[in-house]
Image (cartoon, rainbow, N blue to C red):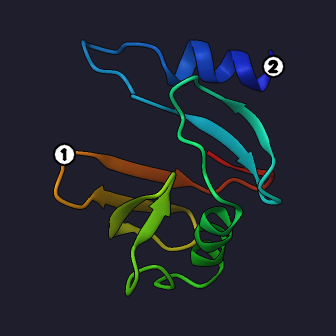
């Protein structure tokens, strides 16, 4: 199975009436392995900041997490494994997972 198939068929699927609005698998180097059509265009420094927060938990807390130009307030996560961000002034949520080879 390709990473694109995984995004399309597993991450973007509907489960009990709910679904993600966008998803991507991004390498530690910022290269896109797969993404949904709705995943926002991001800046390399946004991915660098997310990766740094995995290495240095709390790095993004003072400034927030940015993805596709949108700001997310960093909320409870799991140090080195999960970063959760709540979209400022909206009902959006961003969740980043760190696995050995990639950022999901």
Residue plotted at (56% across, 63% down):
81
Residue 66 spot, x, y in % from top left: 47, 64
Q: Which residue is mark 1?
A: 91
Which quarter of the rendered picture does the C terminus lie within?
A: top right
Nearer the camera: disc 2 or disc 1: 1
**Element marked by disc 2:** loop
Residue under label 2: 2
Give percent across and percent down for residue 68. 51, 51
Give the left or right position of residue 47, taking residue 11 as reference: right
Task: Give x and y (percent) for residue 49.
Answer: 60, 73
Tell me the quadrant of the picture where the N terminus can be found: top right
Asked if residue 65 lies left or right of residue 90, the reply is right
Above or below residue 85? Residue 42 is above
Rendered residue at 58%/25% (across/down): 36
Marks 2 and 1, Cα distance to the nearest angstrom?
31 Å
Label 2 Cα crowd, 10 Å radius (few <14 / some 14-19 / many 20+)? few
Which residue is at a point 56% across and 18% down the rendered structure image? 10
């Amino acid at each position: 199975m390709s990473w694109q198939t995984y995004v399309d068929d597993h991450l973007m699927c509907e489960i009990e009436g709910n679904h993600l609005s966008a998803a991507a698998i991004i390498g530690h180097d910022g290269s896109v392995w797969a993404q949904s059509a709705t995943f926002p265009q991001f800046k390399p420094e946004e991915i660098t900041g997310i990766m740094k927060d995995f290495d240095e938990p709390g790095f993004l807390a003072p400034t927030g997490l940015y993805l596709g130009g949108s700001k997310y307030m960093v909320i409870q996560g799991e140090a080195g494994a999960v970063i959760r961000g709540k979209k400022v002034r909206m009902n959006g949520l961003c969740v980043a997972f760190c696995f050995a080879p990639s950022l999901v």
